[in-house]
Amino acid sequence: MKMLEKQLNERTILNQILTNRSFLMGVAMSLVIVYHFFCWVYNPIGPFNIGYVGVDIFLFLSGLGLTYSYENNSIIQFYKNRIKRIYPIYLVSIIVTYIVSLVSR
């Protein structure tokens, strides 16, 4: 009974994290942007540079989301979802890069 209760509690925590993942990823990105801004302008923090924490949080949450989506789908569906999500922006970036390279010649 204790084990089932512990598993349910862990699942509830995971669901809360996944629900708030976008917000947490936004906070992580904000930490990185603020860190880079202050390092570029001046370094008021001194030896307490902790901007890498934002990167760590962002990568952790990304991996958590990928793992969760992999658990809920078959491997084929997982990769179909990844391709549908990544391929359009990949094509846009290639087209924009090509156009910019033509214009900048």
Image: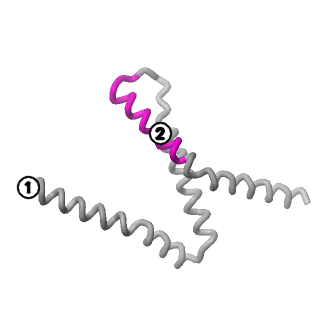
**Could you tell me the amino acid type at mark 1?**
Arg
Tell me the distance, in whole angstroms, between the alpha carbons under discs 2 and 1: 35 Å
- Which stretch is magenta? 25-43
User: Which quadrant holds the C terminus?
Assistant: bottom left
Q: Residue at x 56, y 47 (%)?
A: 23
Amino acid tagged 2: Ser
Front in this rendered view, residue 80 or 53? 80
Q: Residues within 10 Å of mark 1 (few under 14, many from 20)?
A: few
- In the rendered image, residue 104 lying in the magenta stretch gets the answer no
> Which residue carries the number 2 mark?
30
On the image, the x and y values in percent for residue 96 come to 24, 60
Q: Residue at x 43, y 33 (%)?
A: 35
Residue 76 location (% of width, % of height): 52, 79
Residue at the spot of label 1: 105
> For residue 91, what is the image quadrant?
bottom left
Residue at 47% x, 35% y is 51
The image position of residue 92, as x and y in percent, is 30, 64
Q: Quadrant of the N terminus?
A: bottom right
